Image (cartoon, coloured by chain):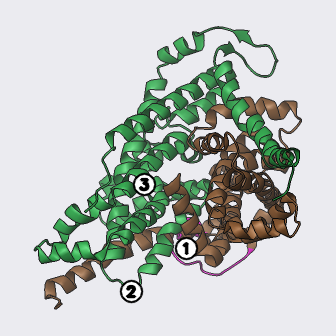
Chain colours: A brown, B green
Amino acid sequence: MKRSVGEILGRAGIRIPLILWSIAVLYPIFWMFLGSFKSNAEIYRNPWGFPESFSWTNFTEAWTNFNIDTSVFNSLFVTVLGAFLTLALAVPTAYAIERLKFRGSNFLFMLYVSAMMIPMVLGWIPLFFLLMDFNLLNNLVGLSIVYAVSQLPFTIFVLTSFMSTIPKSLEESAAIDGLSPYGVLLKVITPLSMSGIITVTIMNAIQFWNEYFMALIFLQSKDKYTLALAIDYISSEAEYTNAWGTLFASLVIAIVPVIILYAIFQQRISKGMTEGAIKG
Amino acid sequence: MVQSKKQKYTFLAFCLLPTFIMFAIFTLYPLFSGLYYSFFDWSGSSHVKEFIGFDNYIKLINDSIIPGTIIHDYFLVVTKVIGIMILAMFFAVALTQLKIKEAPFYRIVFFFPNIMSVVVIGILWTFIYNPSLGLVNSGLEYLGLDSWTRPWLGSEKWALPSLVLPSIWAGIGLFMLMLMGGIANVSKSYYEAAEIDGANEWQQFWKVTLPLVWPQIKISVLYIVITTLNGSFIIVQVMTGGGPNNATHVMGSYLYQQAFVQYNFGYGATIGVMILILSLITVLILQLLMRKEKVEY
């Protein structure tokens, strides 16, 4: 095929919106990094340009005077515990639904999957009092449990579809070798599903690290604040204190782990999310 | 496999019961008791609940703020569906049909906001809309359009439309990838056949691409609608808190305010029931509307 001049121009033209949108995505993020190195005075003078000098003051300020250190720890805690609990709850159920056909297995699967479409906001009011009764309100363990259960439907959904690709013969031969069903689950199925488990865990971890609203409702004291809450708090304070530099520094602290995970697992994350949405 | 029935059931219970009990306690029970609470007058702090029948629902119908919250939610649904689908479709076609070498770069960049925290997105965009320092007003001034500058999030008229752009910005990557997946599955031979028949690229898009990726379009629209109705309040809460003067309150943010700020837990639950019913009805209607059979050539 020969390309006409118009076609070549068209191809160049198509790049313009692509480049513009890339700038629209990258520039605010880039700018947030730049802002985290600027003093407040400089942010007012020159909000969108390069900093005059790079100083880490905002970071040390956020870390020591705005309790970001505690919040990073709290976020890490709920992320790790939440992701671990999700797996501990989801892997056995996904295996049972996918492989041990029992009466009601389809119904159970549908029940879990349909929970993905239900607006949970209605449930948050009773959940608030339930956690209070269990002494889990304003408690990081309580929040981790809530997080884990909230991601159960999605995790079970992804894991069952992943486990359906594992050949049955492997389990059967392991059982013939005398492995108990518990052994099959732990020593055969879990390692073979590792790729699916990793994908879904990264996605759950990002979800928990970023989560805001449940933390807002179920955590109350500043020493329990996760990063999202701490940033929201600094942001509302900044209207009076004008501590924008500190705000940007804490935004950067929140986003860097996500960028690192994305850099390493970019394909897993985008594939996992797309497939999760399509099959859901 | 040699194992007794009892062993089999014990193993099944081991796999299913702990998970189901947790799911029942932390998901099913709260949903159903939310329905139950909506019939009570209850301020939470005292554990005294007064059964008031449908009074909360009557209050809901007469609440002058409620119609606004519903309209705002559906405004966000419609604008997001249109904005995201047009842009995502354009980008998806551009990145798959035209051979662009740096396509993976765009794919990686466009998707990234999808995994950013709503708090980070909200604060970033609040600053972009900042009346004196923000990028939007500075840009307008730079272009000589000083009269267009306004306090975007502080204006009753412009605050809600201003929330659409961050939502589109944050959502587009996922739907672009979903559509790209659909386009990649369309066999090249259809396009070749269309080309032989003399169809130009625009006609190819309407006659080949669009019908064949209809399943992906349908899922994307449903997904945007569900996530907006169930989650639009998060960005509202971060960026405007429902203000100015309730101009951006959506159903979820109003529920939060009633229940967790003003401690009207019974009334909050009633708003929750409304959200549940409206989103189920909307999804049902959408599925009927878009029930176009998959096209096979």
Report the mark closest to the observer, 3 or 2: 2
- Pointer 1 local density, CA inside 10 Å: few below 14, some 14–19, many at least 20: few
Q: Name, please, the residue furthest toward the left.
A: B198
Residue at label 3? B165
Question: Left or right: A164 with respect to B290?
Answer: right
Taking B96 as reference, is B165 above or below it? Answer: above
Q: Name the residue type under label 2.
A: Lys
Q: CA distance from mark 3 to mark 2?
A: 28 Å
Q: Is residue A39 magenta?
A: no
Q: Quadrant of the N terminus of chain A?
A: bottom left
Give coordinates of residue B15: x percent, y percent: 80, 49
Rendered image: mark on residue A30:
1
Is residue A238 something that shows in the picture?
no
Taking B163 as reference, is B136 above or below it? Answer: below
Which SS class for mark 2?
Answer: loop
The magenta stretch is A42-56
Taking A133 as reference, is B237 above or below it? Answer: below
Return the chain for callout 3: B
Which SS class for mark 3?
Answer: helix
User: Circles 2 and 1: CB distance less than 8 Å?
Assistant: no
- Pointer 3 local density, CA inside 10 Å: few below 14, some 14–19, many at least 20: some
Which SS class for mark 1?
Answer: helix
Give coordinates of residue B149: x percent, y percent: 37, 54
Return the chain for callout 2: B
Q: Main secondary structure of the magenta part?
A: loop
Taking B74 as reference, is A52 above or below it? Answer: below
Q: Name the residue type under label 3.
A: Leu
Residue at label 2? B101
Q: CA distance from mark 1 to mark 3?
A: 18 Å
Residue drawn at x 41%, y 37% as measured from the top left: B74
Question: Left or right: B243 with respect to A10?
Answer: right
Give coordinates of residue B83: x percent, y percent: 36, 54
